[in-house]
Image (cartoon, rainbow, N blue to C red):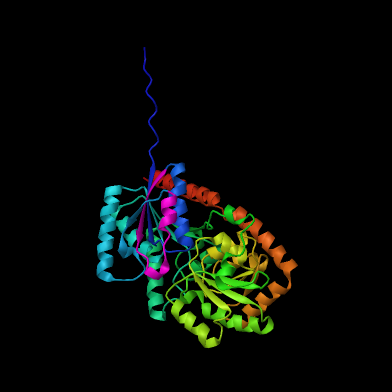
Amino acid sequence: MTTRLAPAPPVAIRILRLFSRLNIGGPSIHVILLTSGLRDRGYETRLVVGREAPHEGNLLDLAAAKGVTCVSLPALGREIRPLSDVRALFALYRMIREFRPDIIHTHTAKAGVLGRVAGWLAGVSVIVHTYHGHVLRGYFGPLRTAFFRGVERALGLLSHALVAVSESVREDLVSLGVATSSRIRVIPLGLELSPLAGDLPRGDLRRAAGVLDTVPLIGIVGRLVPIKDIPTFLASAILVRQALPEARFAVIGDGQERSLLEGECGRLGLSEIVHFHGWRRDMRGVYGDLDVVVNCSLNEGTPVALIEALAARRPVVATRVGGTPDLLAEGRFGHLVPPGDPESLAGAILETLRSPDEAGRRAREGQAHVLSHHSAERLLADLDTLYQELLRARSRAA
């Protein structure tokens, strides 16, 4: 009698995913969801991360809840230290030779540099890099910026695919000469948004700052770093208060500029109406208490705080930078204003508060859009499709 052998189990596709640090923010959520979610699609991922600064907070608890184990390589953090970076490059090379990944996928600038070079040296079949934004405009002086642009152009030649989180980010990269449009795939962010889409609790954030339920509360959510331009938010608060004295303001987040910003609030006479809440874990409670969510960044990829706010059906006001106009459909889902313009920002906030029916309509349409276009399920399907395409192409080439 012939004995039939059981079919061999499918071999998992191995991914080495490199990320600068799991600080609180959208890119960290992105890589955790990818690492966790792709397991069920036949991928084995090793997530290597650098070390975040103490004031940045981290999402290690979210990684643990999703069953994601992180391999620490502190030198992947954002600071450039030549000797340490060379050591990290060789550490990554050794890691690649040991793990033998089918794909290296890097996220953020420094991890993208070291990971792509190490992958090229080790002969990895597929190298992918995601631009969640970029540091090629608005972050550094002219000489340093020109150097980084040249590095990114060279690294683009080592990459089998480049991914941008929005069409605007792709157009910006093309205009900077990083790569041609055909070489950059747009894959929007995907998040777990359903918890924000239902009825939200109200009161916790307001009680922490002594703000009555009937008082308009305008908030900004994110890292307190220069590119987020919190001073423009504070300057707009002065103008909003002049027109609407009962208005109050909330800053949810932390970062290197917090002490400077708190001092600026005191200097401007805003300490009584602007409250700094630090990092908050219960984002349902945060968005449930905010009447308007503001993003006034000088540059953005796709701002996660705005995706979350729209999922929570909150009216939003944001600067016309990076991927934000794409997210807000050129103003259909929220007001867009020029960056660095407190008068325009204050005007949009006041218009939003004074036109609740129109603001509600925009928020409802925005919620429907982000729930269908920015889900975690859609993100996983898009990346799975990209990986399979790249692996087939490399197999044919081999």
Q: What is the quadrant of residue 11 in the picture?
A: top left
The quadrant of the image that shows the N terminus is top left
- Res 213 visible: yes
The quadrant of the image that shows the C terminus is top left
- Residue 271, percent from left and from top: 54, 82
Q: Nearer the viewer, residue 158 or 339?
A: 339
Position of residue 112 relative to residue 101, above or below, is below
- Residue 222, percent from left and from top: 50, 69
Residue 48 is one of the magenta-drawn residues = yes
Q: Nearer the viewer, residue 265 or 299?
A: 265
Q: Nearer the viewer, residue 392 or 196?
A: 196
- Residue 377, percent from left and from top: 54, 49
Would residue 290 appear left or right of 254 to someone viewing this image? right
Range of magenta residues: 43-66
Residue occupying the point 64% across, 81% down: 240
Residue 45 is one of the magenta-drawn residues = yes
Residue occupying the point 40% across, 50% down: 68
Number of numbered markers: 0
- Residue 123, percent from left and from top: 31, 52
Q: What is the quadrant of residue 235 in the picture?
A: bottom right
Q: What is the quadrant of residue 196 in the picture?
A: bottom right
- Res 319 visible: no
